[in-house]
Amino acid sequence: MTDSTLTHLYFLLDRSGSMQSIKTDTEGGFAAFIAEQRNAAGRCRVTLAQFDNAYEVVYADLDVALVEPLTLQPRATTALLDAIGRLVTEAGQALARLPEAERPGTVVVAIMTDGLENASQEWTHAAVKALIEQQERDYLWQFLYMGADQDAIEVGASIGVAAANSLTYARGAVAPAMAAASSMVGELRTARRHCADASLRGYSEKERRDSAG
């Protein structure tokens, strides 16, 4: 069996040029997110990847206690699909190499972007959707999608993320969007210690209002 006390949080963060206007808010919101996860019960490991038209793993499989402040350097365009496809594929391969007892009982993939796909070369919406649905169905992974300046529920649906777990946030409301995601992840971590197939509760109406600015 997998380790019910261990969570692996994969965070995929947009660093395309349009993120410049919310750079500081995103850095602060991410710091608060990590601080809350440090205080939650159970162990947590974090992988952070950033993307524009290129993809970069900032750190991988790092204990949440060791995560340093985020420094975001916005640039370039938005290859969202390629980034999701690569992150999920590489995460799955890495976890498959571990003995089952060392695999996390809870895997959460959080995606945050302020722009629409415009630069991917390898992955399509249909391929990403099939991949996410497979990980949810076969391995009970949980996915969050946060999108600014877009209909995040529509975009989330196009890549396989449930409407309940997709959030549209305003540029001036990065902090409440991050706080809502952190609250959901914290609650899931607690629930999974008692129920292995527990799922994210979904964003509340209040969290949606707060994040809409």
Image (tube, rainbow, N blue to C red):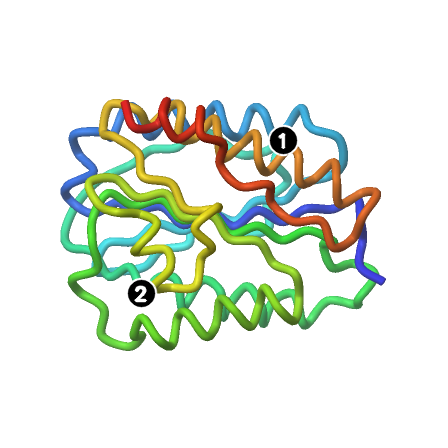
Q: Where is residue 183 in the image (x, y as percent from the top left)?
A: 57, 29
Q: Which dot marks residue 157?
A: none
Q: Which residue is drawn at 71% across and 49% down?
A: 198
Check if mark 2's residue and mark 1's residue have beta carbons within 8 Å.
no
Left or right of residue 127, residue 143 in this image: right
Q: Which dot marks residue 65?
A: 1
Q: Which amino acid does label 2 sit on?
A: Leu
SS at mark 2?
A: helix
Quadrant containing the N terminus in the rendered view: bottom right
Q: Residue at x 65, y 49 (%)?
A: 199
Q: In the displayed structure, would residue 206 be above or below residue 138?
A: above
Q: Which amino acid does label 1 sit on?
A: Ala
Q: Where is residue 173 in the image (x, y as percent from the top left)?
A: 30, 24
The earlier-in-sequence mark between 2 and 1 is: 1
Q: In the displayed structure, would residue 23 be above or below residue 140?
A: above
Q: Residue 30, can we see it?
A: no
- Depth-wise, is mark 2 or mark 1 nearer the camera? 2
